[in-house]
């Protein structure tokens, strides 16, 4: 994948993460040749920056690329991209292509797509990301991969340019399970931090002091580092949206249901994020869950 024809890279989905991954690849000498996004103005702006083609369909991206990154929102979007009954989907151009599917979707979707693509002579790797926008831009993502080992080996040189930590988890679907659990625990931690700071505010405590104490005790967490000040100051610029937190917690809860486990903390967190979405706050950062716990911010039930 380093040179020649195999150097042709395309992107389907150039939102916050996809666009910054494409920028990173261009920076290190792997220019992207074509991109597609349902938000056409976004696609045009990114294409102008990258100096590449704006495709009118996903199939057009695959037709001019050998490696295609897909960075989309959910199960429905992924299934649409690889639909058998749509000439504009990626599936018709799958032969000899490698698809790097980066969306957080249900494990069964990865299994479905791997089967469909392999029937057409192509290859698939799930590339689950446990990082955010700055890491995408800097090439320091934490990547968890699932699929055929030989496909991972083929993709590894390119993925190493995007990551600081690159792990092969196992067959298709396995990396998606791990990613769902990562985000489930992260979301629970976020909800717990919001409740701690919300109660601290209600008790009249200085929240800057409280965050410092949290950081030096058993209340410390990665979420405290990334979201604590944002919760305190109501700065919810989006790095990982509340809507995505709801989706990912939902995937984890569905996995728990499939094996007969009851996860009360995960379900409660899911309900909180779904409430944020219903309140029209789904596009705020996941730190906006604090808006449900601070007395002076809580909307009516």
Image (cartoon, rainbow, N blue to C red):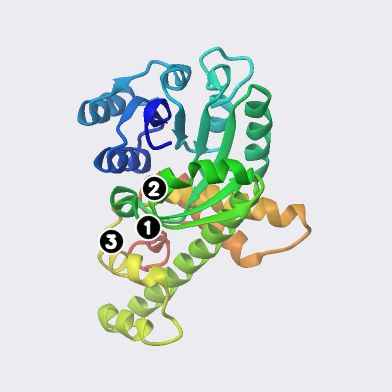
Element type where label 1 sits in the image: helix
Would you place residue 158 above or below residue 185 in this image?
above
Give the mark count: 3
- In the image, 175: left or right of 198? right
Element type where label 3 sits in the image: loop
**Residue assigned mark 3:** 234
Q: Counting residues from the N terminus, which is met first, the one under dot 1 or under dot 3?
A: 3
Element type where label 2 sits in the image: loop
Residue at image position (38%, 45%) is 283
Residue 171, how many percent across, how many down? 67, 47
Residue at image position (37%, 48%) is 162
| C-alpha distance separating marks 1 and 3 | 7 Å
Residue at image position (29%, 29%) is 42
- The reply to whether dot 1 and dot 3 touch (C-beta < 8 Å) is no
The furthest residue to the right: 260
Would you place residue 104 above or below residue 45 in this image?
below
Residue 127, how many percent across, how many down? 51, 46
- In the image, 146: left or right of 35? right
**Residue assigned mark 1:** 288
Q: Is 163 in front, or is 235?
A: 163
Residue at image position (35%, 37%) is 15
Badge 1: few (under 14), some or many (20 or more) residues near its Cα, within 10 Å?
many
Badge 3: few (under 14), some or many (20 or more) residues near its Cα, within 10 Å?
some
If the image is split into quadrants, where does the N terminus sit?
top left
Residue 132, how many percent across, how many down? 37, 53
- The reply to whether dot 2 and dot 1 touch (C-beta < 8 Å) is yes
| C-alpha distance separating marks 2 and 1 | 8 Å
**Residue assigned mark 2:** 281
């Amino acid at each position: 994948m380093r040179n020649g024809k195999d150097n042709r890279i395309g992107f389907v989905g150039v939102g916050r993460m996809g666009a910054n991954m494409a920028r990173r690849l261009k920076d290190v000498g792997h220019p992207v040749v074509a991109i597609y996004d349902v938000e056409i103005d976004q696609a045009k702006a990114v294409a102008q920056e990258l100096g590449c083609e704006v495709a009118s369909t996903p199939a057009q991206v695959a037709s001019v690329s050998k490696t295609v990154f897909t960075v989309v929102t959910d199960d429905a979007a992924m299934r649409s991209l690889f639909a058998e009954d749509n000439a504009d989907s990626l599936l018709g151009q799958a032969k000899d292509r490698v698809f790097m599917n980066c969306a957080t979707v249900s494990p069964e979707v990865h299994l479905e797509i791997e089967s469909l693509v392999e029937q057409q002579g192509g290859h698939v790797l799930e590339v689950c990301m446990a990082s955010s926008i700055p890491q995408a831009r800097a090439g320091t993502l934490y990547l968890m991969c699932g699929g055929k080992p030989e496909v991972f080996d083929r993709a590894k040189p390119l993925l190493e340019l995007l990551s600081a930590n690159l792990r092969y988890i196992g067959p298709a679907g396995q990396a998606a399970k791990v990613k769902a659990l990562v985000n489930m625990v992260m979301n629970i931690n976020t909800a717990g931090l919001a409740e701690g700071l919300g109660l601290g505010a209600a008790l009249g405590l200085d929240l800057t002091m409280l965050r410092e104490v949290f950081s030096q005790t058993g209340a410390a967490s990665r979420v405290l580092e990334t979201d604590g000040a944002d919760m305190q100051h109501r700065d919810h610029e989006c790095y990982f949206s509340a809507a995505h937190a709801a989706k990912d917690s939902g995937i984890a809860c569905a996995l728990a249901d499939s094996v007969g486990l009851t996860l009360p903390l995960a379900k409660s967190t899911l309900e909180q994020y779904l409430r944020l979405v219903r309140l029209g706050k789904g596009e705020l950062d996941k730190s906006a869950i604090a808006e449900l716990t601070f007395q002076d911010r809580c909307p009516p039930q």
